[in-house]
Image: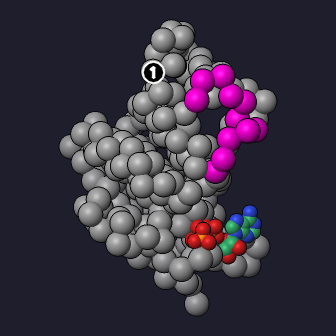
Amino acid sequence: MSPLLEAQSLSKRYGRDWVIRDLDFRLEAGEVVALLGPNGVGKTTLLRLLAGLIRASGGQIRRQGKVGLLANPPAFHRHFTGEENLSYALRLEGHTPRASTIAAALKAVGLPAGKPVLGYSSGMKKRLAMARLRLLRPEIWLLDEPEAALDAQGRELLEALILEARTSGGVVLATHDRDWVQRLATRTLELSPIT
Ligand SMILES: Nc1ncnc2c1ncn2[C@@H]1O[C@H](COP(=O)(O)OP(=O)(O)OP(=O)(O)O)[C@@H](O)[C@H]1O
């Protein structure tokens, strides 16, 4: 079977500074790859490249399936409620979601009904981002520090989501929490500064 993601000789520089250089990377279905490394090493940059949000300075990326990115912090329409944000995301993909589906998705991540996102805490935004990904069902799950700001129950929801994601796709997640990710990752990729 062909990989969900395949990057060859991937490189990215900002000005004269190389952040990623000649990286080969594959993601197969069923994998959870943990991206590790110090602040500023390039984890977010790699996720954004893999998501197609920024252009590489060199190399190629092939994607086999839909990409879902959980950014850190996640982006929403601040003046929309949680329900409106979820509904909007589905409509952008051509679906016409039922109000009951949206309400259930919000409830499943423990969020209150009818509240504009500008009144959400960081952890609540992470929860809403999880609900959005769960509804959108990508094959390629790219998660940037997904555990940050989540409480113990939020982490349980996240772990369940990652296990669910593995059954139909693959996951790449950036984190600083090595102990936490050890139980979830099938593989780790340690990024090192380019000298
Ligand atoms: N838009 C940009 N313009 C210039 N430099 C950038 C830009 N985005 C990121 N960088 C630089 O690229 C390097 C990698 O940043 P990145 O955010 O990918 O690191 P990270 O590993 O995710 O860090 P952290 O663990 O702190 O989240 C840093 O030196 C950063 O300053």
Q: Residue at x 46, y 16 (%)?
A: 101
- Please state which of residues 38 and 129 is positioned toward the viewer in this rendering: 129
The amino acid at mark 1 is: Ala
Q: Quadrant of the C terminus?
A: bottom right
Where residue 175 sits: x, y (%)?
47, 66
Q: Going by the picture, which residue comes out furthest to the bottom? A: 195
In the rendered image of this protein, does residue 139 appear above or below residue 186?
A: above
Indicate the quadrant where residue 128 lies.
top right
Question: Residue 124 magenta-drawn?
Answer: no
Where residue 119 sits: x, y (%)?
73, 38
User: What segment is highlighted magenta in the picture?
Assistant: 112-122
Q: Which residue is mark 1?
A: 104
Q: Residue at x 61, y 43 (%)?
A: 125
Where residue 43 sits: x, y (%)?
53, 67
Question: Residue 113 magenta-drawn?
Answer: yes
Element type at marker 1?
helix
The answer to whether residue 55 is seen in the rendering is yes
